[in-house]
DNA sequence: TTGAAAGCGATACCAG
DNA sequence: CTGGTATCGCTTTCAA
């Protein structure tokens, strides 16, 4: 195999072409430059090397490299089935937009998903909407290869499943019991809530409230966490009272008003408050602090998520840590296997959580 | 103008077609259904109503609606110049990924940008990379209509400007003095820093350190903030010392180690620390708290950003608030005007900032 | 191993 | 007002 010899004519042509930086090089042009057909060029691009002679391969590769060829995705899209696009859908139903975007979980999961998607050679579209129909329209419009849906309500997830055949992976979603083949990546929500409630009980707490914001009756993850909390109470022989499940608003002003009132009335009934997320737990610590209530001296508080709020809060929040990056890795890998038409190893993945002990819980056994 | 009469044949056809939910309806099919040409259908879709007779219009609109027509963006892309795609680029140079994604600013700006982009009928791609060349390749590949680049280094911004003609708006970026027509949306960084430093001085502080992490000499926004801080010192007759500009690491462990050491050594020299971001300021408050140093009793601290960290921190952080949503609105609107080939009203927008007084600064004038 | 040619869906141009 | 048709860049099929 002899060494590749530079061709001055080709060099000149490539240079001439490189001047037109405004218009992109096309496969046809590459073909013309290399003196081969478009077919050969595509074969090289797609790594079908067995279909190309060594010398041709080199020549084409050189032209590709030197022109700085960039494929036009429009052409690909048109030829169906390979957009290389993955769309991350977020449907904020209850919580309002501002809150969700400020929640560090949002940034973390978006960042992690982007990294996973890009590292697998896909591109990420982000679409945030309350309207499931609109989401489906855009997915079809862009022929996206796959969808990752973040924490939506059961009605929406059913809608997504019924209205498209696009590979679909949910994160943190719970579903109607309708037999549809949902693929979900979630947490051991129930176990996490159980663990932390048990921890509170161990520390001598007997009257513990659970606070969440996903409706009465609770839906989705909050229902699971409530169940875990109640399981722990029951198994330790403590009474379960409907009234100990408290609904808090997603609106900061309403939430604070509630807490300010709560402090001077019903709070006396409890020694500990278990919030369904760090976001709300920290907000409560701060509100109570402003009301002169000290944590954990006057009341113990814990959360769920283990995010940066929990670590940067003083007293440091006792909480349940979830693996955010792990969620992203898992979701993308499941989605890719769906895209490859493989049957996923598991439809319902529940990632493990762990207890993070901070200083927001008082040990009541010590006098 | 007589009422539109339903056509049973058409109804049947539409129903038949709707069964093929797997393949999308095309303009050709719409045309066939409505008994017109593709041209007419496009005209209707693009609202060129003056080119279509009333009756035809109605018929076509009905077919579009009933088939649930969704345009295939591939076709559009191919016909150049109208991808309706805006790509948000993030190039983390110094700070590491985890930190950036956890910073609430990230989530807030992403959320706000998405909303702005979508509400103007565009689609958002998110691309996070350290490699400017890679960014340009993807932008060309997708023929994106515009790019929004978040806080990159001067070298990268120059690279972007030189290597593409795609409309480009920067956020929070400072540039080389190379005469390129950068369009940027930033803050009154200098004024903000000036304001808060002046506030500290008013409260009796005379030795104030400035802590940031964008290198020595500082680059980008940190250089401006440093300048504002020094302007305030100078104008109030206080000495300016190189050593009062302290570099902190983006790595949590290094930063904390530095602070822990700092507390027992050089910190005695200062009565106040001004951090270049709330992220670092809050981290410092927490680290100092753990070291038994109380804020503001032992030392005063302030930040810059006015994000949720600052509000949820106790003592509440005194800081400079920036309009995050405003940045997104402004950036998207400038980008759209660039896309429309208009000359932007302003190349360099600096949004106003305001002082937020918390409880993290001690009034030294009170004995 | 290579090439010619037919499409993918939307659009714009030009004729009627 | 409406329709035929060529085009965009890429892929695939089929023939050489």
Image (spheres, coloured by chain):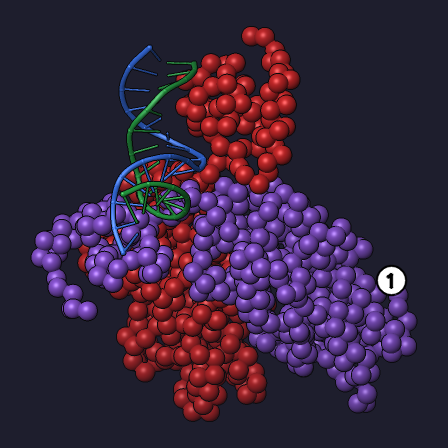
Chain colours: A purple, B red, C blue, D green
Q: Is residue B273 left or right of residue B242?
A: right
Question: As rendered, which of A298 and A116 lies closer to the eye?
Answer: A116
Residue at position x 54%, y 56% from top? A339
Q: Is residue A344 left or right of residue A366?
A: left
Question: As rendered, which of B313 and B155 lies closer to the eye?
Answer: B155
The location of residue C3, given as percent across then percent down, is 25, 45
The location of residue B111, given as percent across then percent down, is 51, 54
The location of residue A209, given as percent across then percent down, is 80, 68
Callout 1: helix, strand or loop?
A: helix
| Residue A267 seen from this side | no
Pointer 1: what residue? Answer: A242
Q: Is residue B301 left or right of residue B5?
A: left
Question: As rendered, which of A186 and A234 lies closer to the eye?
Answer: A186
Question: As rendered, which of B104 and A157 lies closer to the eye?
Answer: A157
The location of residue A240, given as percent across then percent down, is 88, 68
Residue A278 falls in which quadrant of the image? bottom right
Q: Quadrant of the N terminus of chain B?
A: top right
| Residue A360 seen from this side | yes
Residue at position x 16%, y 53% from top? A14
The answer to whether residue B206 is above or below residue A112 is: below
Q: How many labels were placed on the picture?
A: 1
Q: Circle 1 marks a residue in which chain? A: A
The answer to whether residue A127 is above or below residue A256 is: above
Residue at position x 23%, y 47% from top? A29
The answer to whether residue A158 is above or below residue A315 is: above
For this orientation, the residue located farthest to the bottom is B264
Residue at position x 29%, y 52% from top? A40
* Mark 1 Cα-neighbour bin, 10 Å: few <14, some 14–19, many ≥20: few
């Amino acid at each position: 195999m002899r060494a590749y010899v530079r061709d001055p004519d080709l060099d000149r042509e490539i240079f001439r072409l490189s001047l037109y930086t405004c218009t992109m090089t096309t496969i046809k042009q590459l073909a013309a430059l290399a003196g081969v057909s478009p077919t050969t060029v595509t074969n090289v691009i797609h790594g079908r090397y067995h279909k190309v002679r060594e010398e041709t391969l080199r020549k084409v590769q050189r032209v590709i490299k030197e022109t700085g060829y960039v494929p036009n995705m429009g052409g690909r899209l048109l030829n169906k089935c390979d957009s290389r696009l993955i769309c991350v859908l977020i449907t904020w139903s209850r919580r309002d937009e501002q809150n969700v975007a400020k929640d560090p979980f949002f940034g973390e999961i978006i960042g992690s998903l982007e990294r996973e998607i890009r590292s697998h050679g896909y591109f990420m579209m982000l679409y945030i909407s309350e309207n499931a129909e609109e989401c489906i329209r855009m997915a079809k419009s862009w022929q996206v290869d796959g969808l990752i849906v973040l924490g939506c309500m059961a009605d929406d997830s059913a809608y997504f499943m019924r209205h498209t055949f696009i590979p679909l992976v949910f994160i943190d979603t719970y579903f109607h019991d309708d037999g549809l083949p949902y693929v979900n990546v979630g947490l051991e929500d129930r176990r996490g809530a159980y663990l932390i409630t048990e921890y509170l009980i161990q520390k001598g707490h007997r009257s513990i409230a659970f606070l969440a914001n996903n409706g009465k009756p609770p839906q989705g993850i909050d229902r699971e966490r409530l169940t875990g909390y109640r399981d722990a109470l029951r198994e330790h022989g403590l009474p379960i009272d409907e009234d100990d499940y408290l609904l808090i608003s997603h609106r900061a002003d309403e939430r604070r008003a509630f807490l300010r009132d709560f402090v001077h009335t019903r709070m006396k009934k409890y020694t500990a408050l278990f919030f369904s997320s760090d976001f709300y737990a920290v907000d409560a610590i701060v509100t109570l602090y402003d009301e002169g209530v000290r944590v954990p001296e006057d009341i113990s508080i814990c959360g769920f998520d283990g995010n940066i709020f929990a670590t940067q809060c003083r007293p440091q929040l006792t909480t349940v840590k979830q693996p955010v990056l792990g969620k992203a890795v898992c979701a993308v890998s499941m989605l890719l296997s769906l895209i490859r038409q493989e049957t996923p190893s598991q439809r319902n993945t529940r990632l493990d959580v762990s207890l993070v002990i901070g200083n927001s819980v008082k040990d009541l056994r010590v006098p």
